[in-house]
Image (cartoon, rainbow, N blue to C red):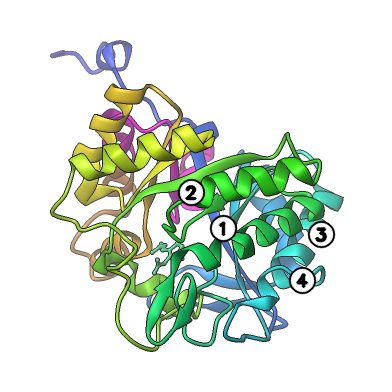
Amino acid sequence: MRKDHLRPLFRETKVDLDDLIMPVFVDENITKPKEILSMPGYYRIPVEGVADEVGRAMELGLKAFILFGIPSYKDEIGTSAYIENGVIQKAVRAIKKDYPDAVVITDVCLCEYTTHGHCGVVRNGKILNDETLPILGKIAVSHAKAGADIVAPSGMMDGMVKAIREALDSSGFEDVAIMSYSAKYASSFYGPFREAAESGFKFGDRRSYQMDFHNGDEALREVELDLKEGADVVMVKPALAYLDVVRRIKERFRVPTAAYNVSGEYSMVKAACINGWLEERSVVYEILVSIKRAGADLIITYHAKDFAKWVNEGSL
Ligand code: PBG
């Protein structure tokens, strides 16, 4: 290892562009890309621009995209999440028309579509798990109809994977896969996303449905349940403060495991780099390698496009 040209031969971990999933925020209310203030360098994209955005990323070698929608209309039960001409449904059709080979993943949740901003139906200040399930099924089917390859329920409702699997199968979408946000922690690292997706909640917090960050064993129980219900990919979120959880899940279940390198993790790196305190390329590379080394097969990351550029330039 004392010689530079030997070290690459013995590298245990590699980050491949095939492993990365790029998040795309699609906004129905804008006509040109709009920068997200708390996520420097990241933009909301209008529906009309989403296919081109995906096309540019595919030219760099990225293949998979996860879509989040900002709708023009919200109500108490998130109706605009499953209408045929909803923001995500339009975006998926536009992408698939121009880029049928793009892997299109859709976030299945209510928080961006409800006036109260919670991930489930609310009554008397309580989030109602079971009443939310059929709505999640409807959202998933509407995304599948538009052409989504994978649906990704992120609301942490109990039984959501089963409800979605049954809804998809009974509508003829047996081939649409489910990537479940199985171990999603109630985390302060989602702050910038809530600005990006306008999904902040109007009261309370998400601790009655997202996981308590003091717990690790619970993540294994959550994953086990999701796998029994039919999840094809399980996810840990956020990534960096939870690499121990990624490792435990991968070792225990040996199933495709994704880690979500979330908005707050991106913003911290960006802020430090803009100030000249950290060097972006090497820090991002080290972060992505660490997530893979922990055992993740897939990484959802806002750094995907920059990383792909650096790979193409050979500048890492
Ligand atoms: C919605 C959802 C959230 C994220 C992905 N899907 C936010 C939340 O639960 O509040 C966060 C992603 C990020 O921070 O990058 N359920």
The mark that comes first in sequence, 4 or 1, is 4
Left or right: 15 in relation to 93: left
Amino acid type for the residue under numbered disc 3: Ala
Establish if 25 lies above or below 290: below
Label 4, secondary structure: give it.
loop
Q: Is residue 39 visible?
A: no
Quadrant of ligand 1: it is bottom left
The reply to whether the C-beta atoms of the residues labelled 4 and 1 are less than 8 Å apart is no
Q: Which mark is residue 304?
A: 2
Give left or right: position of 212 versus 51: left
| Residue extent of the magenta highlight | 288-316
Residue type highlighted by circle 1: Asp
Is label 2's Cβ within 8 Å of ligand 1? no
- Tag 2 or tag 1, which sits nearer the N-term? 1
Q: Quadrant of residue 106?
A: bottom right
C-alpha span from label 3 to label 2: 21 Å
Q: Is residue 156 above or below residue 183?
A: below
What distance separates the C-alpha of mark 4 from that of mark 1? 15 Å
Disc nearer the start of the sequence (4/3) = 4
Say the numbered circle drawn on residue 94: 3
Q: Is mark 1 within 8 Å of ligand 1?
A: yes
Q: Is residue 135 above or below residue 1?
A: below
| Mark nearer the N terminus (3 vs 1) | 3
Residue 176 image point, x, y percent = 69, 39
Report the residue at 63% width, 43% height from top.
Answer: 165
Residue 135 is situated, as x and y percent measured from the top left of the image, at 63, 65
Find out whether the residues at labels 1 and 2 contact each other: C-beta distance under 8 Å. Answer: no
Give the mark nearer the N terminus: 2 vs 4. 4
Q: Can you tell which of label 2 and label 4 is closer to the viewer?
A: 4
Does the stretch in magenta take in 212?
A: no
Q: Are marks 4 and 3 in contact (CB under 8 Å)?
A: no
